[in-house]
Amino acid sequence: MADIIRPTLAAMKAEGCPYKGVLYAGLMITEEGPKLIEYNARFGDPECQVLMMRLASDIVPALMACIDGRVADMALQWRKEAVLTVVMATKGYPGTYEKGSVIKGLDAASQMPDVEIFHAGTQRSRNGEIVAIGGRVLNITASGKTVAEAKERAYAAIEKIQWPQGFCRSDIGWRAL
């Protein structure tokens, strides 16, 4: 915040363009500290899924307060649980990958307690199956009392998903653990 976000907002304000809205900073954590890769004027995913699972307040009044310049008047309520998201991507991503592979087991995975599955690159085929149509396809998001518990739930849900053409990283959350 001190090295990247606040200086950016101060510079925009000084130039007569104060920022209102969601500002998502894409960062790379290096040995020298965080490095800015990009800014987006939107929520980022999978980061947004983690926030939405923890947000106990209604987001609409918060967004309206942002538009009206009343953010300082907002007091958002947050759930105390830890939340973790694991991205499932099509094999080959971020390079070349095939589209149209069938994903099964989503119903069983989504019925697990404290698990939400966010679709990013799927569609329903003509025969009703869920198929992958993108590189980053699913965000498996889980909550728990601790990061370790949230991680365990997310990966347990992934175990229920049958998608041979998909993959995910196994090291999500390692810094927090």
Image: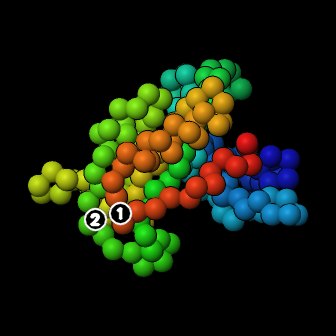
129 on left or right of 108: left
As drawn, 79 above or below 24: above
Q: Position of residue 115 (x, y in %)?
A: 45, 34
In this orientation, does residue 176 appear? Answer: yes
Q: Where is residue 24 in the image (x, y as percent from the top left)?
A: 63, 51
Q: What element carries label 2?
A: loop
Q: Quadrant of residue 35?
A: bottom right
Q: What residue type is labelled 1?
A: Pro
The residue under label 1 is 164
The single residue placed furthest to the left in the displayed view is: 127
Question: Does residue 136 appear in the picture of this structure?
Answer: no
Tell me the kind of residue under disc 2.
Answer: Ser
Judge by depth and name the residue closer to the eye, 104 or 49. 104
Task: From the top left corner, tell me how far across and down residue 89 is, in percent.
Answer: 45, 62
> Residue at the right extreme?
32
User: Whole-Å distance between the Cαs marked 2 and 1?
Assistant: 9 Å
Question: Is 14 left or right of 139, judged from the image as shown?
Answer: right
Image quadrant assignment for residue 84: top right
User: Mark 2 vs mark 1: which is more N-terminal?
Assistant: 2
Choose between 64 and 159: the one closer to the eye: 159
Q: Mark 2 points at which residue?
A: 101
61 lies left or right of 164 = right
Instruction: Tell me how the rendering is colored.
Output: rainbow
Q: Quadrant of the C terminus?
A: top right
Q: In this view, does 18 lie above or below 62?
A: below
- Tally of numbered tags: 2
The answer to whether marks 2 and 1 mark residues whose Cβ atoms lie closer than 8 Å is: yes
Seen in the picture, residue 169 relative to 23 is either above or below; the reply is below
| Residue drawn at the location 37% of the way across and 45% of the way down | 160
